[in-house]
Every structure is written in structure tokens, then in C-alpha cells.
Image (tube, coloured by chain):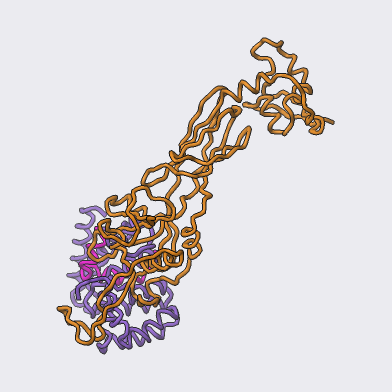
Chain colours: A purple, B orange
């Protein structure tokens, strides 16, 4: 999309906003326009990352890609787009896995919302369960949001929902039930950091 | 009815004899019209042309030893040759011990020397397809390849001393080396049975525990790990490790596997020509990826991206 096209669309949507100022139930057109634009831009960025990484033999290879780190370090700027993209059926599993990993540093509340949307998509079969598995329990060096915050009420509620999702592998459901919900995964996370010599 | 061969471009009486596995002398005797087409002394004596019908003698008869000179074939054999060089990619280096095969008027194979070269001498002219494969067996490579596709070392599996959630490429290498009979010194770390504060203080009991060397340690050439010596000429069976530049990543370690077979190459050798071709073989590794044991070029790609971060080691004596 060229700059003058974007400006034109923005002017049109702002005009439509003015015409629909009483409508409060759905976001006004200008907001929808911004989300749509950001989603398109993020999708293009994710595609470029996927081309560079080639495969996810070693997930850590993503850390070598500058555009990926931009998202990983600032997930809040991309979360709206991530929520939209994760539900799309025309996005590859590789691209969705990249999104799942890029959102690991989201604050807990937003992270839970993203997982919830992804879980819905898995149940509706618009997203592969492997994407959700990676989002819930990535390698420890990626983050451990659910593992570390397992005692929070809202985290436990979500974890209990996830255990019931039949599309998830038995291994993932066992990890949720026997490791994360019991606090064992949090101890394992500590042990991992000790083994790697990482700061606490 | 005797068998007949229709001459195509590039054929000679010698190549036809080889192709049908009959004596060159017998073939000449069976084709007096061709042999008499030009008198002895004429440079075209014994030549064949596209469309000529060459009579193929009965093999039983052809086995008889016939005296006489073989001026045409000797000249061709002595004058044509093909030198083949085989090199690795990436990390350019000669491939020693690769089997190079030429298929054409004759089929031959030879193993490359330390310079990655073979020289097929005294070969008949014609069109050849040149291939290179790596058929040597290394016990450690055989062992690690037998695990390709397994999920035993996946990050989300529990495999003591590593819990589910931890990448286990270093554990895979450690276990493979131990199984192959190598001694790999363990490293120690302090395990806190309790919890650690943000400052790293252990509220509980601390205990010294063992763990295998990390990928980052394998990749640090200054880090001495037993008698695994740093080398600069990686070969199948060596350890390959790289460290990421990112502060989040832990690096990766695996075993150098056999290279992929080279893409076949077609080469036409003319009479008297000393031809040469170069083939490349793609390097591969076997390592514990995030989900499965993989054989691919993923670590070598890292070498291409950032050459300084990759380290190779070999067991010293």
C-alpha cells in the first residue's frame, strides 16, 4: 500500500467516523482501519521473518532476526494484529508459530487474552494445536509466563480450560496438569536457569 | 540374425565394442566394410559415422583372443582423461574419501584423495555423467543418524537431568559421545532445593550438581572440554557448536554428519582431451532440534551467517 493510498483511506474513515459517532458497539472505522493496516504490516513482517528463518529446527534461530526482535521486545505494539492473524485460516503454521513465540513478553493480562483467542481458534479448527502448545509452554529461555504466574486465579482458570482441550497433545496436557498447575514447572524453570548460569 | 548397432553422434568402434561387451578385434573383423571404407594410413581408417550399422559379433566367438594392434582405441585411451575435484560447501574444503563415479562409454569409480581429487586416465571419449557420493562409515555418525526423527530430546520432554522446558541439544551430544565410549567431563552448578530470591539467594538447601557441557561452552574455543580439541578442518564425526549473538539464546551443538551426494554433472570428453570438472557436496549435521533429532544444514547456515561463532572439535588421542 502506498502512502497516498493510506492517507486517502484515513480521510475516508475519519469522515465515516464523523457520520457514525453515535455507534459505540463496534470500533469506529478509523480504529478498524488502523488495526487492519497494522495487521497487514505485521503479516508482511512475519512472512519476511519466516523466509529468513527457513524452518524452526532450532527455535532460537529467530533471536538472530532483527525484525523478529522488534516484535519480541515490543509485543504490546503488535498484540492487536497478532490476535487478528492467529485466527486467520490463510496463514501458515510456521507463521503462526512465529507469532506465538513473538508474544512471550506480553504482560500477563494481554497474554491470557491472546491465549484465550488462540484456544478458541483451535477449538474452531482455524488454528493448529501446535501453535497453542508453543504459546503456552515455549522453551524456558523464551519466557515462562504461565509457569511463573501459575498461582494467579485467572491463570489457573485458563490452565484448567486448556487441560480440557482435546486437540492439545497428551504431553502438553500432562505438562499443564502435572507440571505447571502443581508448581513443579516453576521449580524446573529455576533449575534450568541454574544449569544455564542465567541471572535469577 | 546378428545384432546390429546404429551409430550415434559420439560413438566410435571402440565405444560400441565396450557398450556391447565384445572384443574390439572381433568387432573390427565383423565389420570389414567399415574397416575397408578408408585404407590403412588414412586418418579416417576405422571411423564410424552417425547412421552406420555396426554388426555386433556373437559374444562367445568374441571372447577368442585375437592378435593384432589396436591403433585407434589405444590412441583414444591414452589421450583422453578426466580430473574431478570434490569440495564441501559451505566452509569450503576438499572432500577426502568421496566416491566419484563416471558413467558413459565406460563406467568407473574412484575415491578422492586428501585434496579431494581423482584422475580418470586413459578413458574413451564420449559423454559422461559424473557423480560423487560419500560412502564411508563413521561409528559416531552412524549412531547419531539412527536417532533422526526421534522426539526423546525434544524441549518439552522430561529427560533428567534436564526438565521439560529446557533445550537438550547438549544432552543429546553428551549421551551420544558417552555411548560411543568417549569420556566427557561434566560441569557443576549449584541447585537450590527451595526458591531463589531476585538477588539469587537460595532460600532452602543448596547442592552441587552435575550437568553436561552447554552448547555455549562447546562453542567457546577457549573452553577446554576434556580431550576434545578445537580443529579447523571439520569432518564427519566432529562436534560442531555455535553461540548466538542474542542474549536470549543458548547456542546449539551437534555432530557433523556425512555430506549430501553431489548433483550429477554431464561432461563431454573429446578424443585427446584432458577434461576437468568440480563437484560440491553440501555439509550436514545431526542435532537435537527443538522437537526432533534432525539431519540438515541448520548449523552450517549459522556458519554462513556468522563465521566466527562456529567451533569444531575432535577427540584427541
Is residue B213 shown to the viewer in this render?
yes
Is residue A30 shown to the viewer in this render?
no
Relative to residue B261, is residue B166 depicted above or below?
A: below
Residue lying at 67% horizontally and 10% vertically, measured from the top left? B41
Relative to residue B42, is residue A113 depicted above or below?
A: below
Residue A34 image position (x, y, % from top left): 22, 66
For this view, does B132 lie left or right of residue B163? right
Q: Residue furthest left?
A: B199
A91 magenta-colored: yes
Q: Quadrant of the N terminus of chain B?
A: top right
For this view, does B182 lie left or right of residue B264? left
Compare residues A44 and B215 and report the one nearer the observer.
B215
Residue B238 image position (x, y, % from top left): 40, 55
Residue B18 image position (x, y, % from top left): 69, 31
Compare residues A91 and B27 and report the one nearer the observer.
B27
Residue lying at 23% horizontally and 60% vertically, measured from the top left? A9
Residue A113 image position (x, y, % from top left): 28, 79
Counting labels gives 0
Quadrant in the rendering for residue A12: bottom left
Relative to residue B80, is residue B163 depicted above or below?
A: below
Task: Specify the principal SS of the magenta part.
Answer: helix
Compare residues B161 and A108 and report the one nearer the observer.
B161
Q: Which residues are magenta?
A: A66-92
Q: Quadrant of the C terminus of chain B?
A: bottom left
Amino acid at each position: 500500500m502506498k502512502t497516498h493510498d493510506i492517507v486517502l483511506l484515513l480521510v475516508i474513515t475519519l469522515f465515516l467516523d464523523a457520520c457514525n459517532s453515535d455507534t459505540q458497539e463496534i470500533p469506529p472505522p478509523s480504529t478498524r482501519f488502523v488495526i487492519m493496516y497494522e495487521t497487514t504490516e505485521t503479516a508482511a513482517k512475519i512472512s519476511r521473518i519466516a523466509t529468513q528463518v527457513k524452518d524452526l529446527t532450532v527455535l532460537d534461530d529467530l533471536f538472530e532476526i532483527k525484525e523478529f526482535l522488534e516484535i519480541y521486545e515490543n509485543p504490546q505494539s503488535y498484540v492487536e494484529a497478532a490476535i487478528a492473524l492467529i485466527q486467520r485460516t490463510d496463514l501458515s503454521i510456521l507463521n503462526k508459530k512465529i507469532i506465538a513465540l513473538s508474544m512471550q513478553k506480553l504482560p500477563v493480562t494481554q497474554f491470557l487474552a491472546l491465549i484465550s483467542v488462540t484456544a478458541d481458534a483451535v477449538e474452531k479448527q482455524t488454528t493448529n494445536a501446535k501453535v497453542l502448545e508453543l504459546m503456552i509452554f515455549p522453551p524456558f529461555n523464551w519466557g515462562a509466563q504461565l509457569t511463573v504466574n501459575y498461582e494467579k486465579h485467572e491463570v489457573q482458570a485458563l490452565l484448567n480450560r486448556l487441560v480440557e482441550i482435546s486437540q492439545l497433545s497428551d504431553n502438553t496436557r500432562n505438562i499443564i496438569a502435572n507440571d505447571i498447575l502443581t508448581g513443579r514447572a516453576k521449580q524446573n524453570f529455576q533449575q534450568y536457569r541454574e544449569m544455564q548460569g542465567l541471572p535469577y | 540374425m546378428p545384432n546390429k548397432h546404429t551409430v550415434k553422434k559420439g560413438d566410435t568402434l571402440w565405444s560400441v565394442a565396450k557398450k556391447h561387451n565384445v572384443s574390439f578385434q572381433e568387432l573390427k573383423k565383423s565389420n570389414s566394410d567399415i574397416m575397408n571404407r578408408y585404407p590403412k594410413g588414412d586418418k579416417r581408417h576405422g571411423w564410424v559415422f552417425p547412421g552406420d550399422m555396426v554388426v555386433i559379433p556373437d559374444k562367445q566367438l568374441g571372447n577368442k583372443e585375437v592378435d593384432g594392434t589396436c591403433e585407434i582405441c589405444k590412441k583414444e585411451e591414452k589421450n583422453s582423461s578426466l580430473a574431478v575435484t570434490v569440495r564441501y560447501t559451505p566452509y569450503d574444503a576438499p572432500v577426502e574419501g568421496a566416491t566419484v563415479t563416471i558413467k558413459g562409454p565406460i563406467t568407473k569409480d574412484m575415491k578422492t584423495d586428501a585434496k579431494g581429487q581423482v584422475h580418470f586416465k586413459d578413458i574413451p571419449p564420449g559423454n559422461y555423467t559424473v557423480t560423487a557420493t560419500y560412502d564411508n562409515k563413521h561409528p559416531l555418525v552412524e549412531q547419531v543418524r539412527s536417532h533422526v526423527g526421534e522426539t526423546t530430546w525434544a524441549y518439552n520432554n522430561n529427560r533428567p537431568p534436564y526438565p521439560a522446558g529446557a533445550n537438550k541439544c547438549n544432552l543429546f551430544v553428551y549421551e551420544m559421545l558417552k555411548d560411543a565410549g568417549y569420556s566427557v567431563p561434566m560441569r557443576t552448578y549449584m541447585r537450590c532445593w527451595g526458591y531463589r530470591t531476585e538477588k539469587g539467594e537460595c532460600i532452602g538447601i543448596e547442592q552441587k550438581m552435575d550437568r553436561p557441557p552447554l552448547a555455549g561452552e562447546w562453542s567457546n574455543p577457549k573452553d577446554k572440554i576434556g580431550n576434545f580439541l578445537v580443529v579447523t578442518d571439520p569432518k564427519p564425526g566432529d562436534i560442531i557448536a555455535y553461540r548466538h549473538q542474542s542474549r536470549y539464546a543458548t547456542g546449539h551443538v551437534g555432530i557433523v554428519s556425512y555430506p549430501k551426494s553431489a548433483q550429477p554433472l554431464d561432461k563431454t570428453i573429446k578424443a585427446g582431451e584432458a577434461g576437468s570438472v568440480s563437484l560440491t557436496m553440501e555439509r550436514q549435521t545431526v542435532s537435537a532440534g527443538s522437537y526432533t533429532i534432525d539431519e540438515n544444514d541448520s548449523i552450517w547456515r549459522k556458519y554462513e551467517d556468522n563465521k566466527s561463532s562456529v567451533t569444531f572439535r575432535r577427540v584427541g588421542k
